[in-house]
Every structure is written in structure tokens, then in C-alpha cells.
Amino acid sequence: MSGDLPKFVPLEYVMDELSISKSQAYALVRTGELKAIQVGGRGQWRISLVELEAYIERCYAAADAEASRF
């Protein structure tokens, strides 16, 4: 990760990085697949870049496990 990136990013960043819709991003947070925190008076969701990278690694591991079944 680059030093000029913040520690936490908004859900929109996750949407862009994963090329997913807003509802898909919220679903990941609601189910706990992607850990997030709510900040501020309006409950804005923020995701740690470390957690985002960990989520991506878990997805790769799941894909590898699925591929090895065949």
C-alpha cells in the first residue's frame, strides 16, 4: 500500500476497487465478510485498507480451494 493512502477508506473506494455495486458492498459489510466501522453522525462506513486486502486474500484462497476440487 502506498504511503499517501489513508488508513481507512469509504465504501465507495471498495466499490471502485472491486468493481461492485453499492448494494453488493453493503451486503459484504452486513454479512461480516468485510469488516467495517461506522463513523460520524451519519454513520458513514469506513474500511481499513488492511482489512480490504485481507478480504481479497480470503477470496483468492476460496477460489483456489474451489478450483482444487476439480
Image (cartoon, rainbow, N blue to C red):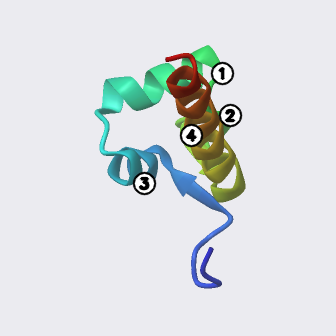
Q: Which residue is mark 4?
A: 60
Secondary element at image label 1: loop
Disc 2 marks a residue whose amino acid type is Lys
Q: Whole-Å distance between the Cαs marked 4 and 2?
A: 17 Å
Secondary element at image label 4: helix
Q: Tell me, for residue 13, which label it has, or none.
A: 3
Disc 4 marks a residue whose amino acid type is Tyr
Give the image location of residue 66, x and y in percent: 54, 21
Q: Whole-Å distance between the Cαs marked 4 and 3?
A: 20 Å
Secondary element at image label 3: helix
Q: Whole-Å distance between the Cαs marked 2 and 1?
A: 6 Å
Residue at the spot 45% in from the left edge and 48% down from the top edge: 14
- The front one of 6 and 43 is 6
Proximity of marks 4 and 3: CB atoms separated by less than 8 Å: no
Q: Residue furthest bottom?
A: 3
Residue at the spot 53% in from the left edge and 30% down from the top edge: 63
- The front one of 31 and 11 is 31
Proximity of marks 3 and 2: CB atoms separated by less than 8 Å: no
Secondary element at image label 2: loop
Judge whether residue 41 can be spotted in this image. no
- Dot 4 or dot 2, earlier in sequence: 2
Judge whether residue 20 can be spotted in this image. yes
Position of 43 with respect to 36 (left or right) is: left
Disc 3 marks a residue whose amino acid type is Tyr
Q: Is residue 27 above or below residue 56?
A: above
Q: Which residue is mark 2?
A: 35
Q: Which residue is mark 1?
A: 32
Q: Is residue 35 above or below residue 57?
A: above
